[in-house]
Amino acid sequence: MKTADLTDKQRQVLAHVERARNEGTPLSEYAKAHGVSARAIYDGMAALRRKGVLPRGRASSKSGFVAVRVASSVIPVMHTAPRSTMLCRMVLGRTVIECGEWPPTPWLLSLASGYRDAAT
């Protein structure tokens, strides 16, 4: 794309970006020193990137992000020594059931299916 195809604002932004690079200063410092809105420069840069005048952002080696690949796997169930504390407590009417480990889901479902709340 030619600079002739750009708006006046976009040409000004491009000039500011080039001057800041030539001075070797960050855009925020350049904007303060020249009395220009840093936000306007950054917004203009985004528009110039969309038009292909400026290159898209590049990956920084300083980035804390790392590429990962997620894969499904089977997590083995670890059997541990019996707990000395209560993990689960169910109160069903006058009945209280306390468990040292999580009960099997089908058992919980069958237990809860026959229970009606006092509000119903």
Image (spheres, helix red, strand yellow):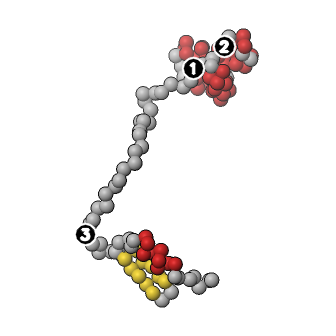
Other residues around mark 2 within 10 Å, as few (<14) / some (14–19) / many (≥20): few
Q: Residue 55: which disc?
A: 1
Q: Which residue is mark 3?
A: 81
**Is any part of residue 111 visible from this angle?**
yes
Please report whichever mark, 3 or 2, sits nearer to the chain's N-terminal start: 2
Image quarter in which the N terminus is found: top right
Query: How far is disc 2 from disc 1 in space, using C-alphas?
Result: 12 Å
User: Residue 119 placed where, x, y %?
Assistant: 62, 83
Q: Is residue 33 visible?
A: no
Q: Which residue is mark 2?
A: 1
Return the x and y of residue 79 as percentages of the image width and height: 27, 65
Q: Secondary structure at mark 1?
A: loop
Query: Cα distance, mark 3 to mark 1?
Result: 59 Å
Q: CA distance from mark 3 to mark 2?
A: 70 Å
Type of amino acid at the residue the image marks with label 2: Met
Q: Quadrant of residue 19?
A: top right
Front position in the image: 32 or 46: 46
Determine the residue located farthest toward the left in the rendered image: 81
Amino acid at dot 3: Ala
- Residue found at x 58% / y 26%: 28
For image coordinates 59% across by 14% down, the residue present is 18
